[in-house]
Amino acid sequence: MSTIEKLYERIMERPIRKDITLSEIVRLAGRYDSLTVIPGGKHQTKIVHCDSGTIIPIPCHGSAVGCAYVEQFQNLLYQIESE
């Protein structure tokens, strides 16, 4: 199993892990052609799905991403895979 597959499994786990970092989400989003990452610097990083126009803002408060934002990202990945 490759590193990216392990990362995918880690992010898609239920219940949602509380130790997923922004860099992990950005790394996995970079593997999908239809996803664009807009870095925010001190502001929110945004994950944009170009086909549907879905935007997931991910605020940067500490190293871990909140469970609600991970769940939104999971739902977006499910949507992409079902297309």
Image (cartoon, grey):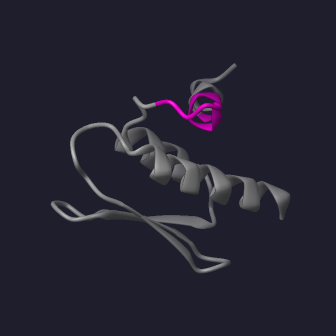
Q: Residue at x 15, y 60 (%)?
A: 42
Instruction: Check residue 13 for magenta coloring.
Output: yes
The region drawn magenta spans 8-17
Q: Residue at x 21, y 65 (%)?
A: 43
The image quarter containing residue 15 is: top right
Side of 44 where 19 appears, left or right: right
| Observer-nearest of 77 and 69 | 69
Side of 1 where 72 appears, left or right: left
Q: Quadrant of the N terminus?
A: top right
Relative to residue 47, is residue 25 depicted above or below? above
Q: Residue at x 63, y 66 (%)?
A: 34
| Observer-nearest of 2 and 55 | 55
The image quarter containing residue 66 is: top left
Give the number of callouts. 0
Residue, far left: 42
Q: Quadrant of the C terminus?
A: bottom right
Q: Visible in this render: residue 44?
A: yes
In percent of width and height, residue 29 lies at 53, 52
Q: Residue at x 21, y 41 (%)?
A: 62
The image quarter containing residue 19 is: top left
Instruction: Check residue 50 for magenta coloring.
Output: no
| Observer-nearest of 24 and 15 | 15
Residue, far right: 82
Q: Visible in this render: residue 38?
A: no
Relative to residue 42, is residue 26 depicted above or below? above
